[in-house]
Amino acid sequence: MKTSFARRAMACVRLCVFFLRGLVLSSCAVARAAFASRQAYCPAVIAVPLRVRTNMGIATLANLISLTPGTTSLHVSDDRSTLYVHCLDAASDEEVIDDIRTAFEDAIVEIEG
């Protein structure tokens, strides 16, 4: 039981660190895009397949995405398997999905147990 609690606590810490890091990096990217003389970004709506299944996990992931500048959670599919996300600058769908998974979803899955 102690190991499970310790793993979940470390996942919470990791989630906070990744969120703060993402917050700073994306804030700088959005500011750079806003003040650029040329608009060189590629907005997109991306379907992110979900591994989290609980309502709390999906809500947490959607809120973390929306709190990160340059991204907004738009909709969760009725079967709760896909989250639609709008990105201000998306180089590729796979890159955005990988970023969301490594920064947020992996930790949320571990916290959920």
Image (spheres, rainbow, N blue to C red):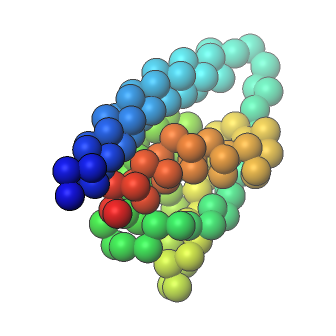
- Residue 29, quarter of the rendered image: top right
Q: Nearer the viewer, residue 102 or 66?
A: 102
Figure quadrant of the N terminus: bottom left
Position of 97 compared to 31: left or right? right
Residue furthest to the bottom: 79
Q: Is residue 75 visible?
A: no
Relative to 51, is 106 above or below? above
| Total numbered labels | 0
Classify the position of the C terminus by image quarter: bottom left
Give me the residue at 59% from left, 64% from top.
84
Residue at figure coordinates x 53%, y 22% from the top left:
25
- Compared with 12, 76 (above or below) is below
Q: Position of residue 8 (x, y in %)?
A: 30, 49
User: Height in image: 28 above or below 13?
Assistant: above
- Left or right position of 93 against 49: right
Which residue is painted at 75% across and 32% down in the image? 41
Q: From what the image shows, is residue 82 above or below residue 100?
A: below
Could one spot residue 99 in this view of the protein? yes
